[in-house]
Image (spheres, rainbow, N blue to C red):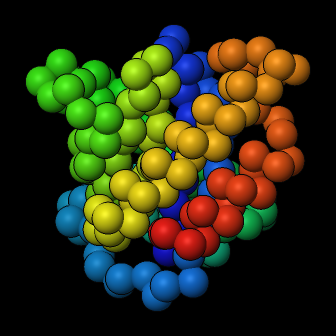
Amino acid sequence: MSHHLFLLSPSDTPLYSLVHYSSKPAQTTSSPLASNLPNLSNWSSSAFAGTFNALSGATSASQAQQAQGGAARIGGGTDRRHVIQMIANASLDAIEEVMRKDSVMYLKSVDKFNEWTVSAFVTPGNMKFVLLHESRNDDGIKAFFNDVWELYVKTMLNPFHTAHTPIRSSVFDARVRASAKKYL
């Protein structure tokens, strides 16, 4: 089971991202969208075959290679990374809509796409922490967001770091990974 974290500036510029693979067993549920899509093995020459595979949740190596015209993909597919980024980007409108209604920092589950649920945390400075996850763990996610926020504030207090620029600190990365391992 994987978790994808994105820290976005008030202008929605990505400042940090993390992919965390949990040791917890993944739930095996088939996507309702996958059953409605046509048989993708017939679409191997289509320019959109890779996108259909990624959106339907198809992960077999043979489908991935057919979608790429026989070219091998590294780590199960580059399309998956782009779909994750698309989901996170598309959820920004839903996050802002919930922000207008509620004046809370932790927005819980704001959007859902196939098996991915999008949770968000918005700081008083309008920084958005977006987490894509496959399972429901509200208490753990809230604790994780609070830890990441504390780490972010400590990073911003560093006089050598400029606000709203990408975070490249190895200490920040290690502590966010440790928090993800603890709570997610």
Of residue 82 and residue 35, the one placed in the foreground of this image is 82
Q: How many marks?
A: 0
Q: Is residue 135 above or below residue 106?
A: below
Residue 102: tell me if it is visible.
Answer: yes
Q: Is residue 154 left or right of residue 58?
A: right
Q: Is residue 174 left or right of residue 114?
A: right
Q: Residue at x 77, y 57 (%)?
A: 174
Q: Is residue 43 above or below residue 24?
A: above
Q: Residue at x 67, y 65 (%)?
A: 178
Q: Is residue 50 above or below residue 60?
A: above
Residue 94 position by quadrant: top left
Residue 89: tell me if it is visible.
Answer: no
Q: Residue at x 79, y 26 (%)?
A: 158
Of residue 93 and residue 67, the one placed in the foreground of this image is 93
Residue 120 on image: x %, y %: 36, 41
Of residue 57 and residue 69, the one placed in the foreground of this image is 57
Of residue 35 and residue 115, the one placed in the foreground of this image is 115
Q: Is residue 93 above or below residue 50?
A: above
Residue 89 on image: x %, y %: 44, 30
Residue 74 on image: x %, y %: 77, 62
Looking at the image, which residue sits at the far left? 101
Residue 141 on image: x %, y %: 40, 59
Q: Residue at x 63, y 36 (%)?
A: 152
Looking at the image, which residue sits at the far top? 11
